[in-house]
Amino acid sequence: MQLDTTAAIITGGASGLGEATARHFAERGAQVTLLDRDAKRGPQVAEEIGGHFAETDVTDEASVQAAIDLAMEKMGRITAAVNCAGIALGIKTLGRDGPHPMGDFQRTVDINLVGSFNVARLAAQAMAQNDPEPDGARGVIINTASVAAFDGQKGQAAYAASKGGIVGMTLPMARDLAKDGIRVMTIAPGIFRTPMLAGLPEDVQASLAADVPNPARLGDPAEYGRLAGFIVEMGYLNGEVIRLDGALRMR
């Protein structure tokens, strides 16, 4: 697969890692449809890159199916799906105000894990209809985990559980979809300069960056986008999790 012939849907495409991926894909000639809940920022980004936008709740089957239908209508097919939509909450299992609110745990898992699977399964159904390339390829799914899946910190029980689930489903999903010519990969980013992190004070950001062995800085979302593009084009990558973290190991 080549990016200039790719038709991609990207969740969380209105900001952060998703926006960076959308911009990189579009710059390389791919068709792109953004799936996001942000009905203001999403259309703006889509217009800037010459793509399309579908307001989407990744946890809702009908919402995702409608977005995929729109993508199929606008692009003619779907050959790549990149899941970047997600949330991160910092709540301890037992804190000063009592036990971790169950609703917050459920919401985190629903958006990060269930939402990614929801998009992946419905995107796979669309990809399976594609005419195969000479090597049998019909599509690729890229999910987003986190280093928290391996090195979860205090207050990250919900987030780490959701991202660990994404890591855990990578290989079985790749095996499930092998007969359809669809690859499945996961990227596990470290600490990236996303809107979520940009809201922190500069000294806090600097402290986080100092924990990264080499290079000692925060990750650039564009680096995530380039890796996602490489995965699309490198057809022998399948069923694997790639850490993108500057050798960071959280303590």
Image: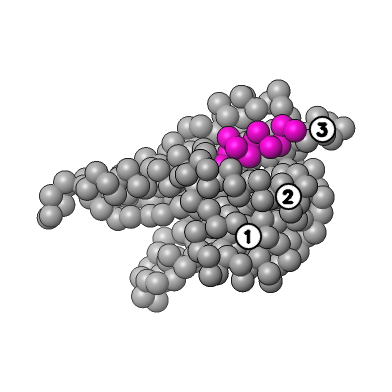
Q: Residues within 10 Å of mark 3 (few under 14, many from 20)?
A: some
Real-space Cα separation, disc 3 to disc 2, in angstroms: 20 Å
Visible residue check, residue 21:
no
Mark before the other along the chain sequence, 3 or 2 = 2
Visible residue check, residue 97:
yes
Please provide percent x and percent y for residue 144. 53, 47
| Residue 135 location, quadrant | top right
Please provide percent x and percent y for residue 227. 65, 52
Tags 3 and 1 touching, CB below 8 Å:
no
Residue under circle 2? 73
Q: Which residues are magenta?
A: 119-129
Of the pair 94 and 121, the residue shown nearer to us: 121
Residue at the image point whose x is 73% and y is 49% from the top? 73
Mark before the other along the chain sequence, 3 or 1 = 1
Residue under circle 1? 53
Disc sitting over residue 132 in the figure: 3
Q: Residues within 10 Å of mark 1 (few under 14, many from 20)?
A: many
